Image: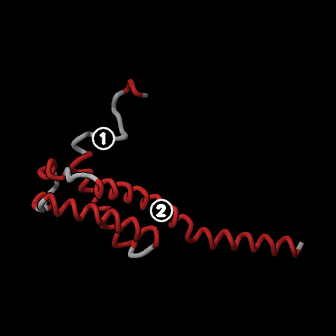
Amino acid sequence: MDMTGSLLDKLVGFANRIGAWLPHLAIRLLLAWEFAESGWEKFRGENWFVDIQGKFPFPFDLVPANISWFFATWSELLGAVALVIGLFTRFFSVSLFLLTVVAWASVHAAMATTFVTTDSSCR
């Protein structure tokens, strides 16, 4: 019985140690993938911020489109790398959150993209 209890204690201890960091790593990897894809698409694409500059919320609408494009691209790329390796995660989390809020307010809200529907025929 002592051997079974010792094995169980080791398994519980191992699960506790993994549980302390694995969920954080998983969410960081998921977010890093999403922002890296978006940043890479901007890096390889053309600057379409010029077309929507007027839709940016204040004070971001005052920043020239080329500068906004540069900072958005490199924030997403560097933020993704930082999230993967766990470097400056709080700084990049806040930065990427603000970037997401601006993107939602200027692009996605205007397109009325939402997961909530009030149409009863969709149920």
Q: Cβ–Cβ below 8 Å for labels 2 and 1?
A: no
Considering only order in the chain, which callout, 1 or 2, is on the residue closer to the N terminus? 2
Give the residue type at disc 2: Leu
Q: Identify the residue at image location x=34%, y=73%.
A: 91
Farthest residue, direction front? 44
Image vertical order of residue 74 relative to residue 38, above or below: below
Percent position of residue 120, x then y: 37, 26
Q: Identify the residue at image location x=24%, y=40%.
A: 111
Give how far apart the Cα atoms at labels 2 and 1 are. 25 Å
| 24 lies left or right of 74 | right
Q: Nearer the viewer, mark 2 or mark 1?
A: 2
Percent position of residue 31, x then y: 42, 59
Which one is nearer the viewer's eye here, 44 or 70? 44
Percent position of residue 44, x then y: 30, 55
Give the quadrant of residue 73.
bottom left
Which one is nearer the viewer's eye here, 70 or 5? 70
Q: Identify the residue at image location x=71%, y=70%.
A: 12
Crowd rating for badge 2 (residues with CA inside 10 Å; few <14, some 14–19, many 20+): some
SS at badge 2? helix
Q: Can the viewer see residue 95? A: yes
Quarter of the image with the C terminus in it? top left
Crowd rating for badge 1 (residues with CA inside 10 Å; few <14, some 14–19, many 20+): few
What is the number of the mark on residue 113?
1
SS at badge 1? loop
| 83 lies left or right of 63 | right
Give the quadrant of residue 89.
bottom left
Q: Can the viewer see residue 100? A: no
Farthest residue, direction top? 121
Quarter of the image with the N terminus in it? bottom right
The residue at which mark 2 appears reads as 29
Image vertical order of residue 97 relative to residue 111, above or below: below
Give the residue type at disc 1: Thr
